[in-house]
Image (spheres, rainbow, N blue to C red):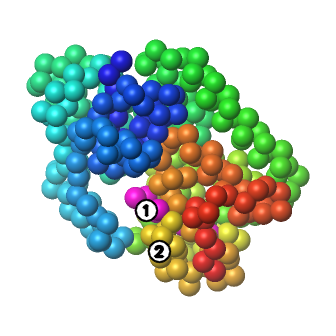
Amino acid sequence: MRLVSLLPSATEIVYALGLGDDLVGVTFECDEPPQARTEKTVVVGGRDTSGMSPAEIDAYVKEQMSAGGDLYTLHANALAGLNPELILTQDLCRVCALPSDHVDAALEHLGCRADVLSLDPYSLDAVLDTFVQVGVAAGVPDRAAGLVAALRHRLDAVASAVAGRRRPRVAVVEWVDPPFTAGHWVPDLVKAAGGEPVAHRAGERSVPMAYEDLAAPAPEFVVVTPCGFHLAGAAEQAAAVVPHFPGAQVWAIDGDALIVRPGPRLIAGVEALAAIFHPSAVPAPPPDTIARIA
């Protein structure tokens, strides 16, 4: 089956299911595994924001959205040339990836008959369910079941390691300027890691929240996981939030790798968070994934 992934997390799912050879198209943001972006045809482009500050990125996004513009560009001719059979996309967040209605319109215009599967999880369990959905749609349901079973086994191992320990209060900052609190599946990750999320929106979209409101529940740990940034960028931004949380431990985490993309590596995110909250109970995470800032 010829597959096209229009979001980075779907690309990771495809490879985790052993379907990398069937993947023919990806987005400019699909950087895991690294060969996805270099060996596959890029069918979705967008603005390079690597040189912009969080406030500048936020202003750009708001400007585009208010003007009815698009943050992503579908290269329709490239997509048509790939003759895809299954396209993986989303409607979860217009800031994160191309919405499925854009894909449907392009396929209708091109006369392409590919199936489109929209992956829109709002919880950790729902994320795991999307792996099954992709496996079924791609004709490898047994592989998907095995992948989910292995990931749940790792979650069970973390749960056993932190069982009976006091759960520290944890605030997750998903964007720093303006500040956004954690939503979607992120509070589930904190709970699975043995923490108690505060100032959060479990199962709902992330929203702006003033720093004084984020700090009001007196979090003991503050984890900064900005979307679109790996550890170096997260660490730089985490340093800026330290004054808002006196007395709390402030940590940066590789958000794209471990927290904000709803793919298989979320389980490694749970393991990394557990290492922050309960370092004596679980092994340390791999280098360059977390850093204590204060």
Residue identifier under label 1: 229
Q: Nearer the viewer, residue 25 or 98?
A: 25
SS at mark 1? Answer: loop
Q: Answer whether labels 2 and 1 touch (C-beta < 8 Å).
A: yes
Q: Main secondary structure of the magenta part?
A: loop
Q: Quadrant of residue 220?
A: bottom right
Q: Nearer the viewer, residue 100 or 272?
A: 272
For the point 83% across and 62% down, the residue is 280
* Mark number displayed over residue 276: none
Pick the quarter of the image with the C terminus: bottom right
Q: Amino acid at mark 1?
A: Phe
Q: Position of residue 272 (x, y in %)?
A: 66, 56
For the point 36% across and 18% down, the residue is 1
Q: Amino acid at mark 2?
A: Gln
Q: Is residue 33 left or right of residue 27?
A: right
Q: Residues within 10 Å of mark 2 (few under 14, many from 20)?
A: many
Q: Which residues are magenta?
A: 222-230
Q: Residues within 10 Å of mark 1 (few under 14, many from 20)?
A: some
Lower position in the chain sequence, tag 2 or tag 1: 1
Q: Position of residue 201 (x, y in %)?
A: 55, 52
